[in-house]
């Protein structure tokens, strides 16, 4: 089958479309004929050699896809050949076909095209699991998301606003800040010209912070928390090792959590996908939460798609079609 192959590790130019062996479905897996996949920041790290696939996962990059079920492994129930689906993957999405554990296969929400559906699994599962299952963001609480105009950020703003939270989002340019407001942020904060700690302190503190920056923002994120606040770290764009002021955490009775979706066992991913289908898909079907896809390009343009993400000029998701 056609798939994205890498000529070593490095810049976007190492990626091209080549030939690899077809996947076969193991017990409890289905094969999906991929119609579209989407680019995640983690894919750019894998390309550079910093984020190897977990044991047993495909060497092909790609954490999500949409398409049609084309084969069923032993013991699979509930899906038929030809069903239109989207799926959360541990890898292998940048290819014509991918084998997926059945618990990570989800229906396409109504009102969304099969191509757009490729942009949903990774961001929906990440935001649902971290902001709602782990940090329990509740109606009326104040929520801060960093990088509100990115893939994760555009989902986080919409989902938190749809569930009744007051949303604050950071962004790097006037266009990105405007997008954050359009998607439901009450206050968009320039991370270049403003101090998000000051803004949040003035508002009474954030009950939940979803952070992509890691070390660089650790102290300031704790400072921005309200009493009882929950900081959830999902990215290390600003480094992995920081200093934590435990006294500040004690005084606020606050918590810091960090998770990685890709490394979680299959049963946890299945539980997260169940939660997404139950809680997020109805909001997508009603139009309250939309896939934000700014760029759609053919799989052959994978190097251009990665260059776009490396430059950071994109908003929302970049989708690759097959
Ligand atoms: N742990 C997990 O399970 C998991 C799962 C998925 C994603 N992630 C992580 O989540 C993050 C976002 O992923 P993505 O795929 O959505 O990538 P993305 O679309 O490239 O988004 C990256 C975001 O980082 C923002 N950013 C850059 N510098 C910043 C700064 N100084 N302060 C605040 N924000 C800044 C960008 O904002 P501007 O564009 O406005 O500059 C952009 O919105 C990545 O770190 C990724 O590794 C983690």
Image (cartoon, grey):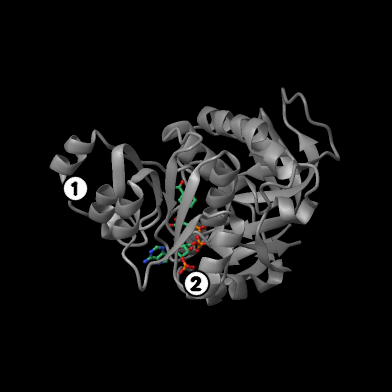
Q: Residue at x 31, y 64 (%)?
A: 195
Residue 283 placement, left or right of 52: right
In the picture, the quarter occupied by the C terminus is: bottom right
- Crowding at dot 2, Cα within 10 Å, few <14 / some 14-19 / many 20+, comes out as few
Toward the viewer: 270 or 2?
270
Q: Residue furthest right?
A: 82
Toward the viewer: 250 or 197?
197
Using the image, tell me which numbered label, if any, was put on residue 23: none
Q: Residue at x 36, y 72 (%)?
A: 192
Residue 229 placement, left or right of 184: left
- The CA distance from mark 2 to mark 1 is 28 Å
Using the image, tell me which numbered label, if any, was put on residue 312: 2
Task: For mark 1, give the secondary structure.
Answer: loop
> CB at mark 2 closer than 8 A to ligand 1?
yes
Using the image, tell me which numbered label, if any, was put on residue 244: 1
- Corner quadrant of residue 250: top left
Q: Residue at x 55, y 73 (%)?
A: 175
**First in sequence: mark 2 vs mark 1:** 1
């Amino acid at each position: 089958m056609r798939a994205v192959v890498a000529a070593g590790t490095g810049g976007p130019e190492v990626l091209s479309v080549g030939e690899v062996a077809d996947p076969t479905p193991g017990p409890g897996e289905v094969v999906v004929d991929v119609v579209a996949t989407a680019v995640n920041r983690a894919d750019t790290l894998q390309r550079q050699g910093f984020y190897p696939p977990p044991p047993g996962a495909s060497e092909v990059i790609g954490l999500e896809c949409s398409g049609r079920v084309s084969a069923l492994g032993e013991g699979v129930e509930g899906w038929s050949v030809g069903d239109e689906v989207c799926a959360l993957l541990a890898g292998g999405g940048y290819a014509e076909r991918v084998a997926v554990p059945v618990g990570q296969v989800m229906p396409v929400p109504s009102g969304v095209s099969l191509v757009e559906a490729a942009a949903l699994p990774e961001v929906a599962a990440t935001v649902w699991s971290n902001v709602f299952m782990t940090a329990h963001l509740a109606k009326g609480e104040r929520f801060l998301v960093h990088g509100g105009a990115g893939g994760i950020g555009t989902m986080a703003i919409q989902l938190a606003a749809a569930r009744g939270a007051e949303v604050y989002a950071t962004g790097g340019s006037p266009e990105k800040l405007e997008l954050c407001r359009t998607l439901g942020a009450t206050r968009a904060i320039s991370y270049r010209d403003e101090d998000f700690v000051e803004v949040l302190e003035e508002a009474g503190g954030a009950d939940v912070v979803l952070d992509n920056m890691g070390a660089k923002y650790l102290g300031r994120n704790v400072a921005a928390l309200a009493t009882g606040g929950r900081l959830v770290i999902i990215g290390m764009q600003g480094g992995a090792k920081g200093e934590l002021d435990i006294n500040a955490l004690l005084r606020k009775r606050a918590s810091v959590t960090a998770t990685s979706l890709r490394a979680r066992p299959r049963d946890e991913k299945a539980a997260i996908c169940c939660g997404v289908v139950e809680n997020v898909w109805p909001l997508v079907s009603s139009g309250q939460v939309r896939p934000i896809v700014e760029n759609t390009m053919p799989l052959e343009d994978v190097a251009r798609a990665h260059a776009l993400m490396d430059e950071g000029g994109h908003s929302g998701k970049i989708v690759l079609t097959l």
